[in-house]
Image (cartoon, grey):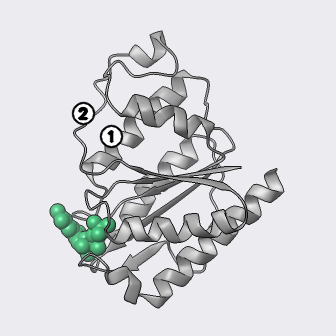
């Protein structure tokens, strides 16, 4: 089965990316196909509310990388969204992913239904619960199934690489990966 992770941080090798890699490594070890898609740092526009995804199901009228990412999401069995906390919320790139792929999925007959969805993200100090909630709302309105871990899916980290010093964060990501694998095997 396929696990897709989307990194909303502009730091392609930052903490959120490494958190996602921990989750993907567990899935890979269990024999699943994985992909890490870099969204952060790429030019993107928000949803323009044009209804194009209703007229042409499965695509967005703004022809950028969101039209490359959405089919990957539609083909995945599990989707892990990652965003660092920026002013207690998501990065703008992750917000664009949520709004635009969420609307495309709605226009394509709730195409993400019953896929597994999990949210992760790095934070220096505060605000990550709100960031995780914003991503979890995407899964829950898209009829998806959301596994947990032994703590909320965050890591206390600021500079690039600090996640590697957060033993509890690494344990939380590892268990999240195990729970995704467990669910994938149950949902088969
Ligand atoms: C624009 C900006 C806003 C931030 N806002 C917050 C914040 O509200 N709370 C916090 O604890 N950390 C905040 N941070 C720190 C990041 O969440 C932290 O450095 C995180 O590890 C970055 O993850 P990354 O390496 O995946 O980019 C902010 C960082 C930036 C650049």
Q: Nearer the viewer, residue 15 or 30?
A: 30
Tag on residue 138?
none
Residue at image position (39%, 65%) is: 17
Ligand 1 has an atom within 8 Å of the beta carbon of the residue at disc 2: no
Q: Earlier along the polypeptide chain: callout 1 or callout 2?
A: 2
Residue where numbered disc 2 is placed? 45
- Mark yes or no: residue 85 visible: no
Residue 66 position by quadrant: top left
Q: Position of residue 126 (x, y in %)?
A: 29, 76
User: Compared to 96, does 154 lie above or below?
Assistant: below
Residue 86 position by quadrant: bottom left
Q: Position of residue 171 (x, y in %)?
A: 55, 83
Give neighbour class at mark 2: few <14, some 14-19, many 20+ (Cα, 10 Å): some
Q: Position of residue 178 (x, y in %)?
A: 68, 71
Left or right: where 92 falls relative to 110: left
Q: Nearer the viewer, residue 44 or 112?
A: 44
Residue at image position (74%, 56%) is: 184
User: Compared to 54, does 31 lie above or below?
Assistant: below
Residue where numbered disc 1 is placed? 96
């Amino acid at each position: 089965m396929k696990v897709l992770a989307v990194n909303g941080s502009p730091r392609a090798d930052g903490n959120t990316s490494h958190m996602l890699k921990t989750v993907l490594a567990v899935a890979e070890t269990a024999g699943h196909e994985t992909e890490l898609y870099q969204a952060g740092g790429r030019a993107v526009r928000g949803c323009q509310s044009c209804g194009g995804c209703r007229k042409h199901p499965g695509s967005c009228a703004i022809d950028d990388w969101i039209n490359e990412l959405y089919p990957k999401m539609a083909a995945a069995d599990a989707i892990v969204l990652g965003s660092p906390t920026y002013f207690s919320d998501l990065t703008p790139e992750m917000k664009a992913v949520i709004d635009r792929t969420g609307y495309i999925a709605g226009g394509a007959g709730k195409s993400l239904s019953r896929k597994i969805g999990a949210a992760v993200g790095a934070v220096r100090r505060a605000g990550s619960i709100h960031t995780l909630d914003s991503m979890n709302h995407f899964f829950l309105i898209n009829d998806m199934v959301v596994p947990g871990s032994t703590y909320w899916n965050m890591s206390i980290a600021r500079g690039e690489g600090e996640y590697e010093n957060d033993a509890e964060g690494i344990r939380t990501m590892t268990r999240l990966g195990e729970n995704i694998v467990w669910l994938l095997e149950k949902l088969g």
